[in-house]
């Protein structure tokens, strides 16, 4: 029997529809060997997903999907795997990145409104 991994999953913390524990339970039913929760710009579900994955004997890899604005026009999605969710520099960077993204999106909306 083959065992698969899924290193790109989203919970309702970003744009998914399930809770972190529901994702782990579903992946268990699908016979997955390993999983990474990679919500957009958030690590809020990591600890919960990690704890539940241990109960189901599924290997868990911390993750995040960082949205970044390229050239003030294009949104890039960057997957980070094996991140240290307790690293203060990483946590500060995530907070600053969220603020920068909000500002950039607002600029885009203003430009779009003025052009349209």
Image (spheres, rainbow, N blue to C red):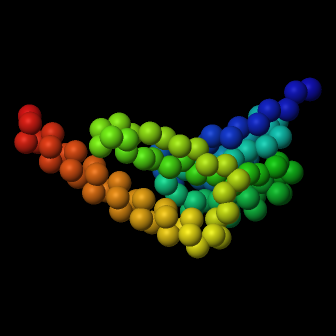
**Left or right for 69, reference 32:** left
Q: Quadrant of the C terminus?
A: top left
Q: Residue at x 29, y 43 (%)?
A: 72
Above or below: residue 9 compared with residue 46: above
Q: Residue furthest bottom?
A: 88
Q: Residue at x 68, y 40 (%)?
A: 7
Which quadrant of the figure has residue 98?
Answer: bottom left
Q: Residue at x 19, y 46 (%)?
A: 109
- Name the residue nearer the viewer: 71 or 111: 71
Q: How many marks?
A: 0
Which quadrant of the figure has residue 32?
Answer: top right
Name the spot of residue 41 as percent of width and height, x first: 49, 54
Name the spot of residue 44 as percent of width and height, x first: 57, 62
Above or below: residue 33 compared with residue 106: above
Q: Quadrant of the N terminus?
A: top right
Which quadrant of the figure has residue 99?
Answer: bottom left
- Name the residue nearer the viewer: 30 or 58: 58
Is any part of residue 18 visible from this angle? no
Name the spot of residue 27 as percent of width and height, x first: 73, 40
**Left or right for 47, reference 103:** right
Is any part of residue 14 visible from this angle? yes
**Left or right for 50, reference 55:** left
- Name the residue nearer the viewer: 43 or 77: 77
- Name the residue nearer the viewer: 55 or 87: 87
């Amino acid at each position: 029997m083959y065992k698969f991994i899924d290193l790109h999953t989203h919970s309702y913390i970003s744009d998914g529809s399930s809770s972190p524990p529901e994702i782990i339970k579903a992946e268990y039913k699908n016979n997955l060997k390993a999983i990474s929760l990679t919500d957009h710009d958030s690590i809020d579900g990591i600890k919960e997903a990690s704890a539940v994955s241990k109960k189901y004997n599924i290997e868990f890899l911390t993750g995040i999907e960082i949205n970044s604005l390229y050239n003030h026009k294009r949104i890039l999605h960057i997957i980070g795997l094996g991140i240290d969710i307790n690293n203060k520099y990483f946590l500060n960077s995530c907070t600053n990145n969220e603020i920068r993204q909000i500002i950039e999106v607002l600029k885009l909306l203003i430009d779009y409104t003025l052009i349209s």
